[in-house]
């Protein structure tokens, strides 16, 4: 017999789902407009999301005006358009470049301690940037942002509810967002959060890959749920991957790490990079070109390819990478070139003169997502705003380093403000919209999962998804490989939708695996749809970049529930 689960209702003007930098900014900005704001986080407060977890030698936020006199907001705009021309919304990019400096000042005002060199800010020149314009906080910039924003939003009265997982979006009879359905894991109850405005900042789909640089709760919830509700998505075939330290802790390896010419060893203790290089290309040339992320546009691609091949051939390290040795690098040079990494290693008791590091090719960020239809991050579903890594429109095949944190702050602020103004203008009008036309169906879906029997072991289907995505959707892609992975994730999705059973203790994992399968299906379908090689989208069966394909594709749910693609020109 199908179980009944307790359903509660809580009201707000704005409900924000997510706990990273973009969501935290949105919550604070919505509250500053006088809105009653509820913020829901899947992980414990301040601990979830790629903003919090991300670390690299040069993790930073790009904004002009804090150092080089020759730099400007116009040049920030130009750099971003150059990297994503044809695939990104120029109006959104203009807003990003113009407003990023003000958002930096906001962060300073609430105590974010940006790195300095003497009296001046320490500025970083990131990939695809023409000037040093990115500001950081000792390599853990995102964590510093979230700490400061979280403290401020709590101080101003935002109601934070952690350990609440997003189950579904709730829409009214007109198709507009009117809240979300969440599952409070601490109390084992469903909660309908009624609100005229919904802001989703649920992040990427890191957990769909074996190797990734965020936290385990990033399971593509926002992408899957928005697709099921008919939202438009864009650029899903483009995502960033690259070398990352996977043991003894996790961090990206930026280009500066490769200027030290680390030795790359397989499990046999043999240097292998030269085995993958064509005649006339040297390992030093590859290292000199290498940055983060992986790109097929220059010879640095052979490094990622070589690493992935060695792991696939069974010559990798225990944690899915290969071994990097810096034993030949003088300690003082290591501290000069990689000061943050050297400090983190020292804190963990790692002697780089004696020990090797495990480095693998890891998923880092989705460049595509739910399409922002305007500069306030409104999606194609009225009342639903999308921000952070979930959102699409300002990241194409490539993007300047430092833009991701900037996007979160700029569009987080704008979405929070716009969501608040929308809700405040509708106060008193929400009650007439009822409980939401889609709520009953969502609750029924949960109760079907709780219909009794032995709970489904979700570890095995999650493993199948990760193996398929890591093997076929990371570095080298082929039509056959993508179709094989697509078959796997569709099978998992069908199993989770028709046969899965859950208890209250396993409900979140069951919902998460279903979303992993749906989000992976969208990405794999998008990669299969783009029959060319472009930047990190490397198709062995379509090795050329086609000028006729210098445009985006929109993804929508077709009548049969499958993803449908159509050309979209920004």
Image (cartoon, rainbow, N blue to C red):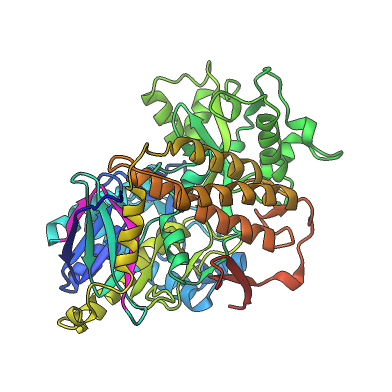
For the question of whether residue 356 can be seen, the reply is yes
Name the residue: 41% across, 65% down: 65
Q: Quadrant of residue 264?
A: top right
Up-down: is 78 above or below 186? below
Per the rendered image, the range of residues in magenta is 158-172
Q: Nearer the viewer, residue 241 or 197?
A: 197
Name the residue: 63% across, 50% down: 487
- The residue lying furthest to the top in this view is 354
Q: Quadrant of residue 321?
A: top right
Q: Nearer the viewer, residue 486 or 446?
A: 446
Quarter of the picture containing the C terminus is: bottom right
Name the residue: 12% across, 61% down: 157
Magenta-colored stretch includes residue 163: yes
For the question of whether residue 125 can be seen, the reply is no
Q: Quadrant of residue 396?
A: bottom right
Q: Nearer the viewer, residue 532 or 490?
A: 490
Up-down: is 444 above or below 459? below
């Amino acid at each position: 017999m199908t179980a009944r689960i307790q359903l509660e209702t809580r009201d707000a003007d704005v409900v924000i789902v997510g706990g990273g930098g973009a969501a935290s900014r949105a919550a604070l900005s919505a509250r500053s407009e006088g809105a009653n704001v509820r913020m829901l986080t899947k992980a414990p407060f301040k601990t979830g999301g790629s903003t919090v977890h991300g670390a690299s030698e040069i993790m930073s936020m790009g904004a002009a005006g804090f150092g080089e006199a020759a730099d400007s907001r116009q040049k920030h705009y130009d750099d971003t358009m150059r990297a994503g021309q044809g695939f990104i919304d120029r109006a959104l990019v203009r807003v990003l470049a113009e407003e990023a400096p003000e958002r930096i000042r906001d962060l300073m005002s609430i105590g974010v301690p940006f790195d300095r060199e003497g009296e001046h800010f320490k500025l970083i020149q990131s990939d695809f940037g023409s000037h040093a314009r990115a500001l950081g906080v000792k390599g853990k910039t995102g964590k510093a942002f979230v700490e400061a924003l979280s403290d401020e939003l709590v101080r101003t009265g935002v109601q934070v509810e952690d350990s609440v997982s997003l189950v579904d979006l709730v829409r009214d009879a007109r198709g507009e967002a009117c809240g979300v359905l969440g599952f409070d894991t601490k109390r084992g109850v469903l909660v309908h959060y009624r609100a005229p405005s919904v802001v989703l900042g649920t992040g990427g789909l890191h957990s769909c890959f074996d190797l990734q640089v965020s936290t385990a709760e990033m399971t593509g919830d926002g992408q899957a749920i928005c697709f099921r509700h008919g939202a438009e998505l864009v650029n899903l075939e483009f995502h960033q991957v690259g070398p990352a330290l996977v043991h003894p802790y996790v961090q990206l390896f930026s280009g500066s790490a490769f200027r030290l010419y680390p030795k790359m060893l397989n499990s046999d203790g043999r240097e292998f990079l030269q085995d993958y290089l064509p005649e006339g290309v040297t390992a030093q040339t590859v290292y000199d070109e290498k940055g983060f992320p992986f790109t097929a546009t220059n010879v640095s691609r052979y490094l990622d390819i070589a690493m992935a091949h060695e792991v696939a051939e069974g010559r990798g390290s225990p944690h899915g990478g290969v071994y990097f040795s810096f034993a030949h690098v003088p300690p003082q040079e290591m501290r000069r070139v990689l000061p943050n990494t050297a400090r983190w290693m020292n804190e963990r008791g790692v002697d780089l003169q004696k020990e090797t590091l495990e480095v693998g090719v890891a998923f880092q960020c989705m460049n595509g997502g739910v399409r922002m239809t305007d500069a306030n991050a409104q999606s194609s579903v009225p009342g639903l705003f999308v921000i952070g890594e979930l959102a699409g429109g300002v990241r194409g095949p490539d993007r300047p380093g430092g833009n991701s944190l900037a996007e979160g702050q700029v569009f987080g602020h704008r979405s929070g403000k716009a969501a608040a103004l929308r809700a405040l203008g509708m106060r008193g009008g929400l009650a007439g919209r009822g409980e939401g036309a889609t709520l009953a169906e969502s609750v029924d879906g949960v109760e079907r999962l709780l219909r009794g029997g032995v709970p489904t072991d979700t570890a095995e289907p999650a493993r199948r998804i990760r193996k398929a995505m890591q093997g076929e959707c990371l570095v080298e892609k082929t039509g056959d490989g993508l179709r094989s992975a697509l078959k796997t994730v569709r099978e998992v999705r069908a199993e989770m939708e028709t046969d899965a059973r859950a208890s209250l203790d396993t409900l979140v994992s069951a919902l998460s695996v279903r979303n992993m399968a749906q989000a992976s299906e969208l990405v794999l379908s998008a990669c299969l749809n783009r029959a060319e090689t472009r930047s990190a989208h490397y198709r062995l069966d379509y090795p050329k970049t086609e000028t006729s394909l210098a445009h985006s594709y929109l993804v929508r749910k077709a009548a049969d529930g499958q993803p449908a693609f159509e050309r979209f020109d920004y």
